[in-house]
Amino acid sequence: MRKSLVAAAFVASTVVLASCAMPADDPNFNVEAMDEGIEPGLAEENAADQVAMEDAFLPPTSIGIDTPLTAPPASGASLVSLTDGTEYQGVFESSLVEAAEVLGWTVDTLTVDTADPVAVETAFAEALAKAPSGIHITGTMVDSLSEGLASAEAAGIPVVCTGCSTSAAIPGITDSSINGTDQNLEWADVLASYVVASQFEGEDAGVQIIALPGTGYAEFNSQFANTLLDQCRNCSSSETFLDPFMVDVADSASVASFIASEMSMALGSWALLDSGAISDTVADTLATDPTLLSPVTVIGRGASSADIQALIALDGAAPADAGAEGDPGEMTTEGDAVAEADGDFTELGGRTPEEAAALQAWVGISQPIMAWRVVDQFARILGGEATVVGPIPSQFLTATNVAEAVLDASGNYLGVADYKEQFAALWGIQ
C-alpha cells in the first residue's frame, strides 16, 4: 500500500507543478506559463532538473568508467586508508580490502576521530611512516591535513580523496574526482527536485539540512538550497551543523536525539541528512517525537542498509485510507490523537505521519564500487597512466523502486551486480 501511496503523491504533485516543470522538448511546455518572475532560462533549468530526477530513479548499469589499463597492475602495492569508524564507512573499507586483494595488494585501515584535527594529523603521519604506495582519505579530513599533505607530496606518496571538493586543486592530493563536486551537485539537484515535486498543494516546503563538516558536504548543501529556491520561490531551507565536538557521529542515539531536537524547532517538515552515516534510528525517533510541529519526512544522500530496509518496509505499511491529499487515515501516535481531536490533521502540517514516512527518499551511492574505483585509480597512478573520471553508480530510491535496487548480501546499496567482472576486464585479469 505504501508503494501506491508514494506513487499517487508523486503523480499528484507533478500535476500541480506541470506549469513550471515541463521538459523543454514537451509540446505542452510553455516558458510563458511558468511562475511569474522566473526568468525563461531558469525555468528551463528547473524543467531539466525535474527530468533529471526522473532519470535518477533508473538503476545504473556501469561502474562509471570504461578505460582499460594498458597492462595488469603489478602486485605488492600497499595502501593505507583513514576512516571515521562509522558502520557506513566500514562498508567502503571492507570493499577496499577486497579490491586490493584481487591485485595482490594490502590495505592498512586507520580509524581516526575526524572531529579532532590533531588526531587526524597524527593518523596521517602514522600512515606516512608506513611508507605505503598510496593513502586514501575523505573530504572531512582535508582541513586538518595541510602539513601532512605537503609531506606526502614531498615523499612522492600519492593521495586519493573521496568526498573532496574538486572546484579547486588541493595541494598534495593526487586525485579527488571520486565522489567529487560534480556528482554531489547532481545529487543535490535530485533531492531538491523531489521535495518540490512532492509538496502538497500550497505547502511551500521548508527543509532543515543536517550538515556535516567538509567542503564536499558544504557544496552539496549549498546546491540543494539554491536549487530548491530556484524551483520553488516560496520554499526555504535552513542549516544545522552537526558539530562532531558536541555530538558523537558514531553514537546513533545521540545523533537521533540531536536531530529530533533541531526538528522540534524547525518551521519545515523535511529533514535532509548529508550522509547515511548519521541516519540510523533518525526516522524512527522523529516518527514518535511528540514535540514536533508536524510529521517529518527524512531524505538524504548516501543511504545506509538501515535506510534501505526502512524504504522496503514501507511497502504495505500505509493505512488503506491514507490519501495523497492530506486524508488523515488511521492515527496511531499521541501526536496524531491531538490532531484527530482537532478534526483536521492538515491544519497542523498537511500530512499524516504515514504520508510523511511514505515520502522518505535517499540517494543510494555504491560504497563498494566507490572503493573498487579508488583501487582502480591507484592502479593507474602507480602504473604511470592517466587517471579516469566518471560517476559513482547511484540511484534515487523511494518505496516505489527500492525493491528492484541491487543490494549486496548485507543490504547495502550496490547498484551494479557484475561490478567485479567489469573491473577485472579493465585490469586485464581473470
Image (cartoon, helix red, strand yellow):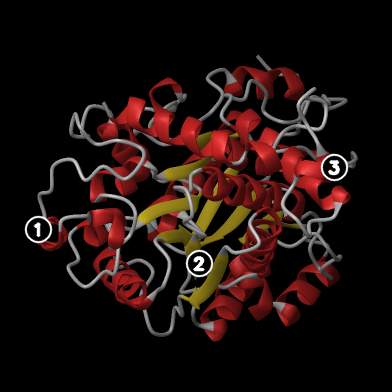
Determine whether label 3 and label 2 are within 8 Å by CB: no
Report how far apart the C-alphas of labels 2 and 1 lie in the structure: 28 Å
Amino acid at dot 3: Thr
Which quadrant of the figure contains the N terminus? top left
Q: Which residue occupies the foreground of this view, 342 or 100?
A: 342
- Mark 3 and mark 2 lie on one chain; the one further toward the N terminus is 2
Q: Mark 3 points at which residue?
A: 387
**Residue 199, placed above or below residue 391:** below
Residue 186 visible here:
yes
Q: Residues within 10 Å of mark 3 (few under 14, many from 20)?
A: some
Which labelled disc corresponds to residue 337? 1
Dot 3: what SS? loop
Amino acid at dot 2: Ile
Dot 2: what SS? strand
Q: Mark 2 points at which residue?
A: 209
- Mark 3 and mark 1 lie on one chain; the one further toward the N terminus is 1
- Disc number lying in front (2 or 1): 1
